[in-house]
Amino acid sequence: MVWICYIIMLAVPYLLGGINTSIIITKIKTGKDIRTMGSGNAGFTNTLRTQSKSTAIIVLFGDVAKAVLAVWAVRLSFLFIGGIDTTNVALNMNWVGYVAALMVVVGHIFPLYYGFKGGKGVLAAVSAIFTLDWRSGAILLFVFIVLVAITRYVSLGSCVASALFCITTLIFTHFIDSDPSGIINTVIALFTGALIIFMHRGNIQRLLSHTEKKLGEKEKS
């Protein structure tokens, strides 16, 4: 029965990740596709810039909820279907949660329901990271907040925090917790962070050319 759990590990987070609150709520409120507005990104920041703050808050809660639910859905499926507690470090199965986190980000970025064109996965990623390890989540969120507060560039904070994900994972799971799956967790974290940075390639180009919009600057709708 464990094989069912592995299918769930890949499919459920991906499908949950593809439920894009930004696309849904903007369509309901305006009748328009958020991907044709502002920066064209179906995520929290573009929603905040092109829609109301209340709409952005709904997107915030939606992205957080689906990421947390995805990780726990996988963990509980292994526990109740496969009889494996993946949070037990001694069982060397903690990597399962990291795969779930990666898949929810993949689902958010490449949603099956919306022609494989979604957001950049930052909010979904940080929510999943907090679910996996609050210590990593707290450090990455702190770095993000400090960088955005200083520079007003959300993309810069997102990219730096994403790059640090594999480092915090290596430190906490491999060196501090002595988790047997620590190296595997780190590799998965590396792929997750690299994917998010890749999705910000346009932002990186604009940062280098000093044309990137700062937090608080409105996009044209």
Image (cartoon, rainbow, N blue to C red):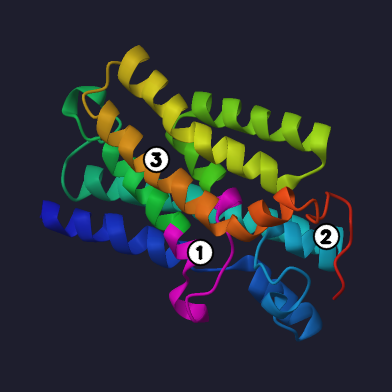
Q: Nearer the viewer, residue 110 or 191?
A: 191
As shown in the figure, which amino acid type bears the numbered disc 3?
Leu
> Residue at the location (77% across, 45% down)?
153
Disc 2 is placed on an element classified as helix
As shown in the figure, which amino acid type bears the numbered disc 1?
Ile
As shown in the figure, which amino acid type bears the numbered disc 2?
Ser
Q: Mark 1 = which residue?
A: 109
> Residue at the location (28% across, 43% down)?
96
The span from disc 2 to disc 1 (Cα, nearest Å) is 23 Å
Q: Nearer the viewer, residue 160 or 22?
A: 160
**Is residue 152 something one can see in this rendering?**
yes
Q: Nearer the viewer, residue 191 or 140?
A: 191
> Residue at the location (73% across, 33% down)?
147
Image quadrant for the N terminus? bottom left
Give the numbered dot on residue 190.
3
Chain-order first, disc 1 or disc 3: 1
Disc 3 is placed on an element classified as helix
Between marks 2 and 1 in the image, the one whose residue lies nearer the viewer:
1
Chain-order first, disc 3 or disc 2: 2
